[in-house]
Amino acid sequence: MNARLRPSTDAPRLGFLGLGWIGGQRMQVLADSGIAQVSAIADSNPECLDRAVVHAPQARRCGDIAELLAMDELDGVVIATPSAAHAVQAVAALDRGLAVFCQKPLTRTALEARQVIDAARRADRLLDVDFSYRHLNGVAELRERIGSGAFGEIFAIDLVFHNAYGPDKPWFYDLAQSGGGCVMDLGIHLVDLAQWMCGATGHADLNATLHAGGHVLSRPVTEIEDHACAQWRLGNGTGVRIACSWRLHAGRDAVIEAAFHGTRGGAAIRNVDGSFYDFTVDVFDGTRATRIASPPDAWGGRALVEWARRLREGTGFDPQAQALLDVARTVDAIYGR
């Protein structure tokens, strides 16, 4: 067990940095779970702090990360700030001996991701990212089936994430702050899912086409893309194709799908009727489809609760954090970096 962590019978004491929509929602789920204590909250927006206090009345209000990290009684930090701040904030927390859970993307580039992972390894602290689609009902079972060979060899994966809208915060449209557009915002979820489901990484023979306002961008990109298509091969030979976009005329709010094609069967995770929150998971055998999961499913925040549970058990650095770097490398390759 890490020396800094409390005994596993005690709930970890967490600080929350960034309490916008996603940060506030995750904090509420964590507070309701009872698995950890919300001991401190920090945000530059007083209105966000006021909303957060409703769900964590005992939490200390902090004006910035320096004040939060100065607290001696914390065990971990949950980061939900703009992407450009993630690397510096995560390293600062890890260097203070705190575990870190970060909203995606962990960082803007693979170089930054390596710096964060190295800091977690040095500190022997638990590091994870909110790749929330891993925690949809039925997805863990689907991963087990893929791993057991139930579908034969998975030779192709098709990934789609089209959002009829775009982000409502200006920093998303500044490459220096966001690190990228729809691939960084949406596609990264599915890049991670494909690698995690198959237990394979890599991006051999990668080809990508990115658009902004209908115009093809040169790679490496120097502006924010709103549409992207890419294909590559994982290290095990599986072919991956992805298409993602903001503000696409798709006839619905969102189109989200991850389909896995094997030599003896297949499966798909799909959103329902354009929903961002409702998903089905089906397995296929020829023309026969069998549903293994469907709504309702309160999956938002499960990744954070699982991280907090592991923190409570005293888990330190997990070598599986290397997968976060593998995802960042693939995203860098899509952007031509």
Image (tube, rainbow, N blue to C red):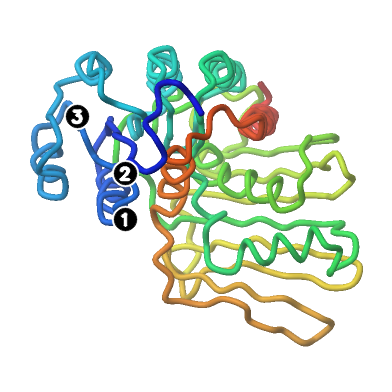
Task: Return the x and y of residue 312 as percentages of the image width and height.
Answer: 42, 40
Query: Label 2 vs label 3: CA separation?
Result: 20 Å
Mark 2: amino acid = Ala
Tell me what residue is drawn at x 41 percent, y 24 percent. Answer: 86
Is 228 drawn above or below residue 151 in the view shown?
A: above
Q: Which residue is mark 2?
A: 36
**Labels 2 & 1 near each other (Cβ < 8 A):** yes
Q: Percent position (x, y) of residue 143?
A: 70, 60
Crowding around mark 2 (Cα neighbors within 10 Å: few <14, some 14 to 19, many 20+) is many
Mark 1 and mark 3: Cα distance apart in space: 22 Å
Write the residue at 31% across / 55% down.
33
Left-right relation of 165 to 113: left
Could you say whether the residue bearing mark 3 is in a helix, strand or loop?
loop
Q: Earlier in the sequence, mark 1 or mark 3?
A: 1
Determine whether the residue tagged by mark 1 lies in a helix, strand or loop: helix
Label 3: how many residues lie within 10 Å, few (<14), some (14-19) or many (20+)? many
Q: Residue furthest bottom?
A: 288
Give the class, few, some or many, for how many residues have Cα within 10 Å of label 1's Cα (few <14, many ≥20).
some
Q: Amino acid at mark 3?
A: Asp
Locate residue 295, reporting x and y percent: 46, 76
State how far apart marks 2 and 1 are (Cα): 8 Å
First-in-chain label (2 vs 3): 2
| Residue 33: image tag | 1
Q: What's the residue type where badge 1 is placed?
A: Ser
Q: Residue at x 56, y 40 (%)?
A: 183
Q: Nearer the viewer, mark 1 or mark 3?
A: 1
Badge nearest the viewer, 2 or 3:
2
Q: Which residue is mark 3?
A: 43
